[in-house]
Image: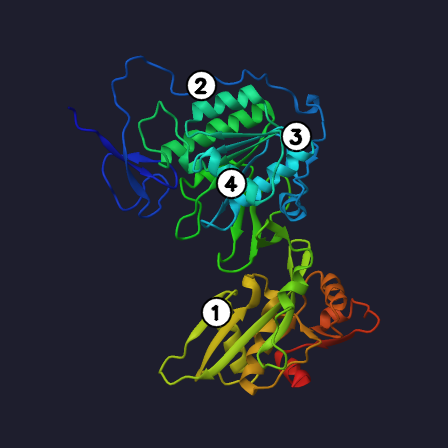
Amino acid sequence: MAKEKTLFACTACGYETSRWIGRCPGCGAWNTLEETVAAPSAAPAKAAKQRPGTGAVAMLLKEIPEDVTLRISTGISELDRVLGGGIVEGGLMLIGGDPGIGKSTLLLQVCANLCREGKRVLYVSGEESAKQLKLRARRLNIDVPNLYVLAENSLDGVEEKLREIQPDVAVVDSIQTMYRPEMSSAPGSVSQIRESTSLLMRLAKESGTAIFLVGHVTKEGAIAGPRMLEHMVDVVLYFEGDRQQEYRLLRAVKNRFGSVNELGVFQMTEKGMQVVTNPSEQLLSHRAKGASGSVVFCGLEGSRPLLCDVQALTSQSYFGTPRRTVGGADTGRVALLLAVLEKRAGQKTYNQDVYINVAGGLELSEPAADLALCVAVASSLKDETVGADVAVMGEVGLAGEVRAIPQCERRIAECQRLGFTTIMIPKENLRRVTPPEGVKLLGVDTVMQALSVLF
């Protein structure tokens, strides 16, 4: 029996070589080559490597009809927000997340909502049997007559059913379990994922069926498989959150049909994924009263203003190098702000362990949170509380100056809606904003001025 020939394929670009090397010659990435079984060189019948094209004719741009593509609502407002308004006909969407985060649960609820609207839906399960899917649907109280379920791993069988049923929306759970029978590599390998996604992409564009792909993630948080997988699809969504917590965050990192800055907030319950209609109120509901080191900040996630609790804790360090533990913010940015506090505001942190946390599992990526982080650290250092009705926002520069932030009016309106009567903002924004009734706006130029006003 002839020994199987193996190749090393790059998980980032698909480059293949006969031996392992540390750096991929194709894309330059390090340690991305994985061993796979090569296809046999002698085939019983010579076949084309790729299927023929669609035979489309080149057209002038001005002759292409301007048909407005109607979006299909998923019946879940938060998912529609992240998708940019709903599902686009012929779109190929990839959703990734940790195991048990709720990807399959959410998509099964989407399928049920679409079926209730009269749409034809096909759910392809490569990981669970049809009976297991039935048990999940019963737990979620899903009982719709026009939802097709197919437990299949072979892409040839999936393609046959897609062409036969002609569904409006299809779900493939998951893309790492699908395989092409004519390829000798194992399911989940670089070549199988690439070819399977290519086939589904061609089917989506030809038939107009919108297809959701479920993707596994690696321990680094990236979707398993070749990096080009994210380039082939139209939309890439990531489900974030801890399985031990009830809140789940859905973000779009790529969207050809809408914005990539939107955020959807869900809550895992016994009845499946439930929409959190007022996330600001939910995130602040467990805020500690009268505790130092706690500051409310209003951030923007796409077009949505979102209030969150920024927490800081300082304690004297008994080691030569104090600890800096940060959750929900950039560690380098926090180190910069601590240096500004020490140099420009006279707050001694060189002998203090500093712990930063953003409650609710949010990630603060915008510089408008700088002033809130500085105030939270200073509050813990002084052991003095910030008023329960005070919100703080502003960008901090290296000179200690507080710079203007975008869309300040929307942030103020959200703070006012939740009952905050005192809002600290940059003085530059104060010149361009009309204070709402019942709200006191504090304009500051420097971090030192902000601390002197609050404490």
Quadrant of the snapshot with the C terminus: bottom right
Q: Are marks 2 and 4 in contact (CB under 8 Å)?
A: no
Q: Amino acid at mark 1?
A: Val
Spot the residue most to the top: 45
Provide the secondary structure element on which disc 1 rests. strand
Q: How many marks?
A: 4
Disc with the residue nearer the chain's start (3 vs 2): 2
Number of the label disc, if any, that sits on residue 326: 1
Q: Earlier in the sequence, mark 3 or mark 1?
A: 3
Q: Residue at x 33, y 45 (%)?
A: 32
Residue hosting label 3 = 119
Q: Quadrant of residue 37?
A: top left
Residue shown at 64% from the left, 33% from the top: 115
Among the 4 quarters of the image, the one containing residue 418: bottom right
- Residue identified by numbered label 2: 51
Mark closer to the observer (2, 4)? 4
